Amino acid sequence: FPSSLTTSNFNSPPFLLRYFSVRAMASHVVGYPRMGPKRELKFALESFWDGKSSAEDLQNVAADLRSSIWKQMSDAGIKFIPSNTFSYYDQVLDTTAMLGAVPPRYGWNGGEIGFDVYFSMARGNASVPAMEMTKWFDTNYHYIVPELGPEVNFSYASHKAVIEYKEAKALGVDTVPVLVGPVSYLLLSKPAKGVEKSFSLLSLIDKILPIYQEVVAELKAAGATWIQFDEPKLVMDLGVHELQAFTHAYSALEASLSGLNVLIETYFADVPVEAYKTLISLKSVTGFGFDLVRGTKTLDLIKGGFPSGKYLFAGVVDGRNIWANDLASSLSVLHALEGIVGKDKLVVSTSCSLLHTAVDLVNEPKLDKEIKSWLAFAAQKVVEVNALAKALSGQKDGEFFSANAAAQASRKSSPRVTNEAVQQAAAALKGSDHRRATNVSDRLDAQQKKLNLPILPTTTIGSFPQTLELRRVRREYKAKKVSEEDYVEAIKKEINKVVKLQEELDIDVLVHGEPERNDMVEYFGEQLSGFAFTANGWVQSYGSRCVKPPIIYGDVSRPKAMTVFWSSLAQSMTKRPMKGMLTGPVTILNWSFVRNDQPRFETCYQIALAIKDEVEDLEKAGITVIQIDEAALREGLPLRKSEHAFYLNWAVHSFRITNCGVEDSTQIHTHMCYSNFNDIIHSIIDMDADVITIENSRSDEKLLSVFREGVKYGAGIGPGVYDIHSPRIPSEEEIADRVEKMLAVLESNILWVNPDCGLKTRKYAEVKPALSNMVAAAKRLRTKF
Ligand code: GLN
Ligand code: ZN
C-alpha cells in the first residue's frame, strides 16, 4: 500500500482495518463546498484581489482547505473521495483553463494558465471585462460561460486536476479526480462573438477530446483508478443529436480510459428515458451516478433495466438542502436497489455536489437545539453517506440510526412545525383561483383618479444606498448595543433624508429606501414564524460571493405587521404616494432552504397568505401603492419544459393571492430582476399586477421584441432605463433615447421610467446625478405629448 499513508498529516487507521473497511463500505461524495466552514477562501481571495496578500498566501489557504476536506472524508470512511472539486472561482472556468480555451482578448500567450489570466477571465481587468456568468442549472451557483468558436486552438493548459490528485495522494488519500464531462462542457458553452448562429458547439467535440485524453493519461500515470465525469446536461431535454455526442465522446475516449474505472455522474433531476438508454449503453463506463432526491423517476428507470456488472452510485443524501437524511427510508431504497444491481455494485452517494448546501453545523452554536437535530450540512452529510454504506454492509451503527430516527420523529410531531390553522388555510387554496375582480385597465383608471400621476411617471425600485454608518446602526441594534429608541430615530432620519431627496429630484412615486433591511428575504423571514437563521450557513453563489439562505422549517404565519410602521412613517413625511415595499412569496421561497416534508407549492401558498395579510394591513394604513417584489420568480423555473407549466401556475397563483383582496384604487407593483422574460411573458401578464418594473438595461431589444411581436399588454410597465450594477452615470440624452425606443413599441400611458433594480449597492454620488438625469429625461419627453 502507498507509503504515503503513513505521512504525519493523517491519523490513518491501521492498514488491515482500513483495507477491510474500504472493501466493505462503498460510499461516495460527488463534490464538496470550497469556501471553507468560515468562508476562509472568500477572505483569502478578496485579500489577494485587493493586493493585500500574495499568491502564495492564497494557495496556502486553499491547500489547507483541500487537505482538511480530504481528511474529513477519509476519517468518515468515505471510499470514493473526490478531488478537483475545489476551485479558485468555478469548475467550468477550470475546465476552460484545462482546455486552453481562453478568449483572445485576455492576451494569453500559451503556457500553464496562472492566476492573472484565470482571474481576468472570471472578473475582468482594467482593460477587459469579465466573461459572462450564468446560473448553474436551477441552483443559485453561477458558472463562467465558455466562449467557443471554430477558431479556438485547444491545448492542455491547466494541470490542476492532476496536481490535486497528486496532492491528495501525497497526503495518503487516493481520490477520484472529477472533471466536467466533455459533452456537458460544450453544451454549457456559448458561441463566441462574431461566430455565426449556425455554429454547432458540439462540432468541437473532436478537438477537445485529445486534451481529455492527455489529462486521463496523466491521471492514470499518477495512479488514479477511478475518474468521475460530471455530465449533468443529461438531465435536460436533449435531442438525438446531443445524445449521440455522448455515445461518440465516450467511445472515442474508450482506448484511453481502458484500465480505469469511469463514473458518469448526473444530478439535479432524473435522466429522461432516452438519455438513460444512451447513458447505460456507454461501454467505457463502469459506474453511473443518479440523483435519487430530485430524480423522482430514477428508481423506475433503474428497475426497468440496469447493465449487469456496472456500479450504481445512488445519490440518496440531498446535496441541495440542509435536512438530515431520513436514514431508515434511504436504507430501504438502497436495499431495493441492491436487489437489482447486486450488493457489491451499489455505492451510497450524495444527490449532487455538496457545493449547494451549507458547510458545517458545528459552527452554529446559537441555533436552537431541536431544530439543529433536524439538520445536516455538508460535513454531516458525509457522515450520513458513510453510515448508510456501513449499514448496507451489515455494520449498522445502531446509536446513530436511532438518534436519527428520533430526530425525524420529533420533526414530524413538533408543534413548532405544524400549525393546523395555517395548514387548513393553505389547503383551502388548492385548485381555486384568486384574482382581482376588475380588469387591469379599469383598475388603472381608478388608481389614476387617486394618484393623479403625469404620463411617464418616475419611480425607483426600493432601496437607496446603504452607507457604512447605516449598516453599523443596524448591526449594533441587532447586537443590542443600540437602544430601540435610538435605532428608530436613526432609521427615521435616514428615511427622511431619502424622502427629501426624492422630492428634490421630483420623483413621482416615492420609496422609503429600505434602510431597516439587511436583505430582502431575511428581513421578512425574521418576522415570520417557521423560519430559522444560521450564523455560518453560507453557500457559494459565484466567485467569492456567498449567500446565507434562511431555513423554512415550519408552517409559515405572520404574528404581526412587518412593514406597516416604517411605511406609514414614510408616508407621513410626504404628500406624494409612498410605495409599500414587500418581498413576494415565490422569491422568499426560492431564496430559502425549504421544507422537504411538503411540496414547494404548499410552502409558497403559506407565505402568500402571510404576505396577503401584510398587503391588506398596508392598505388599511393608507398606503395606496404597494410593490411586491418577485425578483426570483423566473429562477425557480424547473429544468425540464414538461414541468414549467405546473410551476408557473402555482407561482403566479401565489403572487395573485397576496393582492387579490385590495381595492381597485390600490396600485400593485411588482419587480423582477432578470432580462430574459420573453419565454414566460404570458405568465407574467397572468400575475395581473398593475405595474411591473423589470431589469432590462442590458437587453432592451430582447424585451421590446415581445411587444413588437404583438403580445397584448395593458398593465403599466417600467423596463429599467439604466443599469444600476455599474457605477457609470447615464446622461439625460441617453435615457431619453432609450425611453423613446420603448415608446415606439409601448403605449405612452402605460410606460414608467425607473432604474433597473434597487440602489442599495450604489453610492449617493452616483445615484443623485443618475436619478436627476432620469427625471429630466422623463420631463423632456412629456412635453411631446
Ligand atoms: N426592493 C428591492 C430593492 O430595491 C428589490 C431588490 C431586487 O430586486 N433584487 O433593493
Ligand atoms: Zn431587481
Image (cartoon, helix red, strand yellow):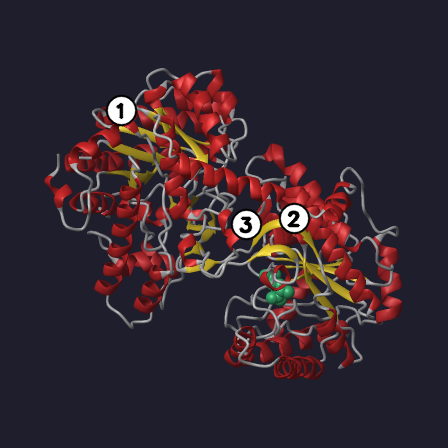
80 shown above or below 128: above
State the separation of the CA atoms marked 2 and 1.
56 Å
Q: Horizontal and vertical percent for residue 31?
A: 36, 43
Q: Name the residue under label 2.
A: 415
User: Who comes first in sequence, dot 2 or dot 3?
Assistant: 2
Q: Mark 3 points at which residue?
A: 593
Badge 3 amino acid: Phe
**Along the line of sight, which residue is nearer the eye, 532 or 738?**
532
Within 10 angstroms of label 2, few (less than 14), some, or many (20 or more) residues?
Answer: few
Can you say which quadrant of the picture contains the C terminus?
A: bottom right
728 shown above or below 584: below
Badge 1 amino acid: Glu
State the separation of the CA atoms marked 3 and 1.
41 Å
Secondary structure category for the residue under label 2: loop
Secondary structure category for the residue under label 1: helix
Q: Mark 1 points at which residue?
A: 254
| Ligand 1 located in image quadrant | bottom right
Which residue is pictured at 12% across the width and 37% down the height?
2
